[in-house]
Image (cartoon, helix red, strand yellow):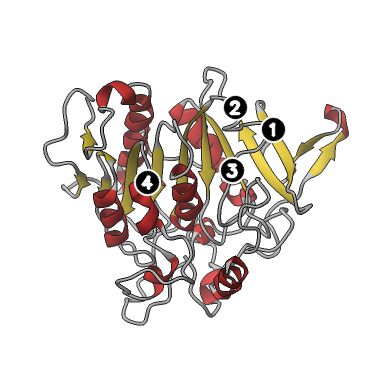
Amino acid sequence: MGGITSSIAAKFAFFPPSPPSYTVIADESCGGRLCIPEVPRRDGVDVLKLRTRRGNEIVAVHIKHPKSTATLLYSHGNAADLGQMFEIFVELSLRLRINLMGYDYSGYGQSTGKIVGELFSSGVINTNRPTCSPHVSFDNRQDICGIYGQSVGSGPTIDLASRVPNLRGVVLHSPILSGMRVLYPVKRTYWFDIYKNIDKIGMVNCPVLVMHGTADEVVDCSHGKQLWELCKEKYEPLWLSGGGHCNLEIYPEFIRHLKKFVLSLSKSKAATSGSNKTTVVSEDLSKPSESGTSDASEPRPKPSESGTSDAFKLRPDIPEASRNSLDSRLEKSKKSNKPEKSRMSTDHVDRFRRRKGLVW
């Protein structure tokens, strides 16, 4: 049955950047350590190749913050790879003061193997069910404070969170209810569906932060809101008014809310009871939030005009592939064709948007 599911899943639109936006080489000047020459050289960054049981190699980056012992595992969205995500990872590590580990799924970037195929039997990271590497492992280390899933990356994130005990927090960034529910308004989960987040979110036993843009034309904001309602331990969510699918980082509220959540993780055990009651963790952690939401819909300056230090300022010297490809727009006929703001530069044309198929 699993093989059939993988075959059907492969029919969905998975568009890894082609060609990949980066390469991996051994730097002889650093004792043969692996590096990505297309991104800026930084201290405290390890480039890893992790071998699966099937013999495939998964490329990952481990970005270390000098004052942190906790690590966030990040599963990125569709149509992206590590070369495009690198500066986002670095920025998150610096702003949140946390170690961050990101990886490419099988068939993405320089990771080998099929895009959909290894259903976790490898024990390492793949598109459906990721685990950590030997360098940052749930089995032999206790430094994973949380896991982060963006869009399609919410699938492996929720799957992992539903099975790993003692996880301290989960971030869902523009998440999906399931693969089929992105494409069609189905009311039930079919056996051939993939990323069945709607059925697994109730098994996550740690605080969950959900962030979604209200103007998301790829994955409707209702996906994030329904997942939040189904969480056992609800952290105050962030509904960004006017936010799209690929530009939440440019909103100052985005990083401010993430910071509050990361700070709350050290206190989450004291802030929530050991029962299965639904709990909303508020910003001050001393009492439940009255509304249970953080709706950033009040009038405020546009992200590009805010001038706040909490807005992401990404370097222009990353690989030329469009940051908008961090999840190309879903071509829904009933949606308008109004273009969404790119996370970085509007000068690039998203070549993935032109392809036929459904991408999220």
Q: Secondary structure at mark 4?
A: helix
Expressed as whole percent of the image width and height from the top left, the position of residue 173 reads: 39, 49
**The label number, if any, that marks residue 277 in the structure image:** none
Q: What residue would you read off at disc 1?
A: 46
Q: Are marks 1 and 2 in contact (CB under 8 Å)?
A: yes
| Nearest-to-viewer mark from 2 and 4 | 4
Q: Which image quadrant is residue 30 in?
A: top right
Sooner in the amino-acid sequence: mark 3 or mark 1: 1
The type of residue carrying mark 2 is Lys
Give the side of residue 98 with respect to residue 189, left or right. right
Residue drawn where x is 59% and y is 73% of the image: 4
Q: What residue would you read off at disc 4?
A: 203
| Nearest-to-viewer mark from 3 and 1 | 3
Query: 10 Å neighbourhood of mark 4: few (<14), some, or many (≥20)?
Result: some
Front residue of 296/225: it is 225
Q: Marks 1 and 2, Cα distance to the nearest angstrom?
A: 8 Å
Q: What residue would you read off at disc 2?
A: 64
Q: Marks 3 and 4, Cα distance to the nearest angstrom?
A: 17 Å
Vertical placement of 46 versus 36: above or below?
above
Sooner in the amino-acid sequence: mark 3 or mark 2: 2
Sooner in the amino-acid sequence: mark 1 or mark 4: 1
